[in-house]
Amino acid sequence: MNKTITGQAWIFGDDVDTDVIIPARYLVTDDPKELGAHCMEGIDPGFPKTFPKGDILVAGENFGCGSSREHAPLALLGAGCGCVIAASFARIFYRNAFNVGLPIFECPEAAKGIRKGDDVEVRPAEGRILNLATGEAWTFPPFADFLQDLLDSGGLVPWVSRELEKRRASS
């Protein structure tokens, strides 16, 4: 992923589970916009209506724990989330985020150093997170080429479709 992501930080704590990201009663759809309309309302009832497109979620440890539903990262995308920065991610959420094309960055130092409302810039290709409000900067290992390509494609399904089309064209 080569695109720089810039937005204001919204702060959440440790162990934010998938039931909080998108409550089970809304799992009757997989439409990101419909899911986004209820994203994070268990923690912050006003979140879906006040979260500006492109802003950044910053969380503590074990973000996305709980059930293995792809609805959680889809809800974040539908809400307009530019990316998630966390101290750590639950493994199944980590994989699901890439599968649906949600950029996520594991950086414990940034998760501790960023405050609510700080303007943040993430440079995925460089492996850098900048807090534009304080001047602090942190690094993380850039994604492997395949994961970068997966995010640039918008997730696993669009990536597979593109690869199949390439194979058909070269046959």
Image (cartoon, helix red, strand yellow):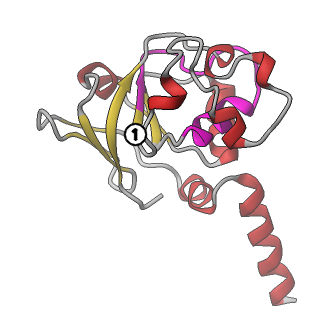
Q: What stretch is highlighted in magenta?
A: 57-79
* Residue 56: x %, y % from top left: 40, 36
Nearer-the-camera pick, 111 or 125: 111
Q: How many numbered discs?
A: 1
Nearer-the-camera pick, 96 or 71: 71
Q: What residue lies at 67% left-to-right and 42% top-to-bottom?
A: 33
Q: Name the residue under label 1.
A: 55
Element type at marker 1? Answer: loop
* Residue 127: x %, y % from top left: 34, 47
Q: What residue lies at 76% left-to-right and 27% top-to-bottom?
A: 69
Nearer-the-camera pick, 145 or 54: 54
- Say if 13 sits above or below 150 in the image: above
- Say if 95 sits above or below 99 in the image: above
Would residue 91 appear left or right of 171 to someone viewing this image? left
Check disc 1 and give the amino acid type. Answer: Asp
Magenta stretch holds residue 138: no
Q: What residue lies at 54% left-to-right and 20% top-to-bottom?
A: 63
* Residue 88: x %, y % from top left: 48, 22
Picture quadrant where residue 134 is located: top left
- Say if 32 sits above or below 19 in the image: below
Magenta stretch holds residue 68: yes
